[in-house]
Amino acid sequence: MFPRGWFIWWLLLTLHTPACCLEICEYDSDEVICSQGLSECTMKNEILLVKNDAVDVQNLTAYFKLCSKSKESCTLCLMIDVELHIHPDFDMEDEGHSGLDEEGDNEEMRNPKAASVTVCYQTASTLPACKKVEFKVNHTALTEQNQAKQISMVITEPFSVSFSSKVLVYSSKSDLTREVVVPSIDEVCSQELRNCVEECRVPKLRFSIHKDNYVELQFDGRNNSLLSVCVQYEKNGRCQSWNRMTIPLSSVTHCMCLKAWYDQKYVRSLHCPFTDMDLSQRNVWQNLSVSVGQAQTTYGTMLSWNLSAPCRLEGEVWPCHRENSCREMKGFRQQLSNGTWKQNSKGLWEKIGVFEDINLQLSPCVMVKVTGMGHELGPFCFNNTDRCRLSLLVVGVMLLVCLTAIIFYLLHDFVKKWVWSWHHGGFVKIGRKGNVVLLSPPDVDDAVSESVCQLGFLLCKQGFNVSVDQWSRKEQSTLGPLPWLYSQLLELNSRWDRVVVVLTRKALERTEEWAHQHKEVIKTKWEDKGVSQIGSPYSDVFTASLCLIQADKQLGRAGERFLLVKFDSPLRSDRNLPELLQGLPLFQLPSQTPALLTELIAGGTAGRSGGKTWTGWKWGGSDGWRAKTKY
């Protein structure tokens, strides 16, 4: 607590020591300097106020300076000058005990007497910090000179004191109390001494304009990870936090300023680098908006206008009647520079005004002329309620028509499938997706294998039940490739189920070789070797699919169950395929992926013939694979 109670703060209003510009002095630690007549001066920290009746404090002065630690660094110092009055009979006293023994009187007169004085300081939010100065009074110097002596105290880096702090300084021996205010960091950094103050070091801004229509900010100085930046429009505008080092070129205006600093205790540097850019002025005009409405006051209804822009503007606003052109109503012009501009929540500057004695039933308009622009802006018109309702009705009808057209367009494919379903014997579930067996070519490489897997994942996402030979290696090892394929084909019992065979250059060569072999020779090899003697699962499954395709073509049902896809260069025509594969639907991926999905969803109805319906596959023993067809 302060001595003499909190009432002392009111007393400070008349004793306040104003802040002044800081000077610099060369001190790097606490020091005390005593005037002539006082010797052996020492200063130490003191917790409590200690009174010494032999020494009175006549005057107390406190102020701040910058103490230099080095040529490039300095800190705050509290300077306290204490003027003392020492009693003339101090030589007859001994620290509060009067009287002297008769023996040794002359010796004590020659020796100096010890004394002390305590001075405390504190801010409003901290406890007092006290310094006790102990010294000896030289009797000879005291009698020869004036009895008033002075002590100068230097306190480097005073406790809990910073720039802009209010500090109360008082002594233990009098009612003298002084308040001193430390200059603000902005005041200090505006002086020539700012070079040695750490808090005055600010980042320096550089910027460059890129062809990609953005401005890159570059700050020179300390670690940019400690850097804080905010953007404000106009020097007295609200600063909004900015956490990127780029600014879109369309947002740059002549009144845009940037503040940058390293920490809260550091001064903030203000940069307004875009003042002279022609583009920045055009950006202000392009982001200018005007709205017109009605204002209700005690005097009646008036025409109100609201203009907002990134920067404050100069110019004129006036009302007009809209006929062939907007004819000005004389005597109503208002200047944008008059009145108050306010910044809204979006950071834009707004100017609001009203025009009195305007008939709103005539739907008046507002024109704007901005200084520097080559043309006027407007008209911005006020629409009464009846016209607004009519406009809303027209807009509503147009929206309804557009919505109907969009729905018809989106459901066009659904309607076509519904009509097809009706013509083919009744309603079916549109969009039903069946089973797909995806077979790899023989001896595939990594790229083809990855493409096959991606196609399998795509079909799964589209809702198909997909079986890929590459995903079933464990089952093929257990059952054997041919039984595994047989088990998969048993699931193909609906018109939506298809077998997709992937073709590569190697697959086409294998098909040609297979087609040139005699049917009986192939049958003999299959019966003699058996499943276990054939090494490549790709070759087994692919060769088996060729047998099934040939059987399908012999029954006149080519293309009902099998589809061909190709990932590499497209074929010029169907004739480039081996004869066995000609007539089967071929899709070049990825360009024809939508067509492939459509074919799988529709179930290949375009290739169906007569009333044949697929019912499944049957193992024919020595006759190999046979397709069973129901007529």
Image (spheres, grey):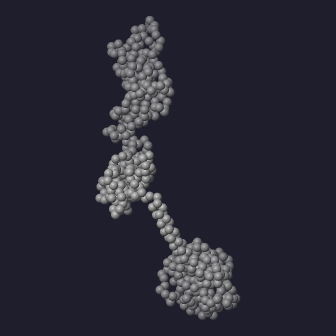
Q: Is residue 493 above or below residue 80?
A: below
Report which quarter residue 288 is drawn in. bottom left
Q: Answer yes or no: is residue 204 visible.
A: no
Residue 544, horizontal then vertical, whole percent: 62, 85
Quarter of the image that includes the C terminus: bottom right
Does residue 420 appear to the left or right of 132 in the view shown? right
Q: Answer yes or no: is residue 397 visible.
A: yes
Compare residues 472 and 539 and report the one nearer the observer: 472
Compare residues 484 and 114 and report the one nearer the observer: 484
Residue 283, horizontal then vertical, whole percent: 36, 57
Residue at image point 64% right, 89% down: 611
Q: Is residue 114 above or below residue 586?
A: above
Report which quarter residue 18 is drawn in. top left
From this viewpoint, which residue is outermost toward the right? 621
Residue 316, horizontal then vertical, whole percent: 33, 52
Report which quarter residue 493 is drawn in. bottom right
From this viewpoint, which residue is outermost toward the top? 102
Residue at image point 31% right, 39% down: 192
Residue at image point 65% right, 91% down: 524
Q: How many marks?
A: 0
Compare residues 629 and 588 and report the one nearer the observer: 629
Does residue 275 appear to the left or right of 90 in the view shown? left
Residue at image point 45% right, 18% down: 52
Compare residues 545 and 173 and report the one nearer the observer: 173
Q: Is residue 501 above or below residue 58?
A: below
Residue 184, horizontal then vertical, whole percent: 39, 37
Q: Is residue 580 above or below residue 105?
A: below
